[in-house]
């Protein structure tokens, strides 16, 4: 549990995180960010590849859980679509929301991962909580502020954390 801006692994999009990859890392709980990770900002639906992916993970025995900083209805909407639990107003980069998901599921940090698109919130929260961090490329830039933020994340997006010892 340390402050780090480096993810453990990087993926082109969330659907590239397979049950096999999670199993190899010993992950049984995958915590999901919402905005720009499983759905673009401003939408209230999920693309079929994302819903198919989520179902394949559940069939493989992976528990899914949404942890979002969003204060509105989006976390609940997407949790309902995927039939999974959620926490909104998580306060990332604080690890509080991630730790709440761990407590609610009874999963140890070493057996959990967070999939998210941002370094300064998702990656820091995951690393502080001691869970695996799986960084995904943002789905879509919707405003200039996000584009600038992602620009400042580029040095950290190019690096990855050293593997933990088992």
Image (cartoon, grey):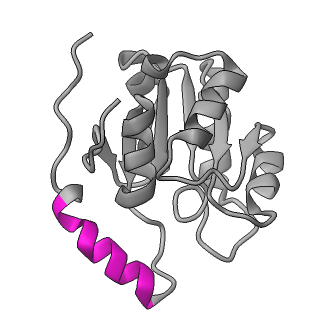
Secondary structure that dominates the magenta span? helix
Residue at 25%, 73% in the rendered image = 152
Residue at 61%, 25% in the rendered image = 102
In the rendered image, the quadrant that contains the N terminus is top left
The residue most toward the top is 166
Query: Foreground residue, 55 or 124?
Result: 124
* Residue 157 in view (yes/no): yes
* Residue 56 in view (yes/no): no
Query: Foreground residue, 53 or 160?
Result: 160
In the rendered image, the quadrant that contains the C terminus is top left
- Magenta stretch encompasses residue 100: no
Q: Where does the magenta region start and end?
A: 144-155
Q: Residue 135: percent from the left, percent from the top?
A: 37, 49
The residue most toward the bottom is 144
Q: Residue 77: percent from the left, percent from the top?
A: 81, 57
Q: Residue 147: percent from the left, percent from the top?
A: 37, 81
Query: Foreground residue, 45 or 41?
Result: 41
Query: Foreground residue, 38 or 76?
Result: 76
Residue at 16%, 31% in the rendered image = 162
Left or right of 21 in this view: 37:
right
Residue at 47%, 18% in the rendered image = 111
- How many numbered marks does the figure carry? 0
Q: Residue 117: percent from the left, percent from the top?
A: 43, 58
Q: Is residue 110 above or below residue 143?
A: above
- Magenta stretch encompasses residue 154: yes
Instruction: Determine which quarter of the picture holds residue 58.
Output: top right
């Amino acid at each position: 549990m340390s402050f780090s801006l480096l993810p453990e692994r990087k993926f082109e999009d969330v659907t590239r995180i397979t049950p096999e990859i999670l199993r190899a890392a010993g992950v049984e709980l995958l915590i999901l960010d919402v905005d720009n990770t499983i759905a673009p900002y401003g939408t209230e639906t999920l693309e079929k590849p994302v819903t198919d992916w989520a179902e394949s993970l559940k069939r493989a025995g992976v528990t899914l859980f949404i942890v979002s900083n969003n204060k509105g209805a989006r976390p609940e909407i997407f949790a309902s679509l995927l039939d999974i639990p959620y926490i909104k107003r998580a306060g990332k980069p604080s690890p509080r929301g991630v730790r709440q998901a761990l407590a609610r599921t009874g999963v140890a940090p070493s057996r959990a991962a967070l999939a998210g698109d941002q370094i300064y919130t998702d990656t820091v929260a995951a690393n502080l909580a001691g869970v695996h961090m799986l960084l995904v490329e943002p789905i879509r830039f919707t405003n200039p502020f996000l584009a600038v933020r992602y620009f400042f994340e580029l040095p950290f997006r190019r690096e990855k954390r050293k593997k933990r010892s088992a």
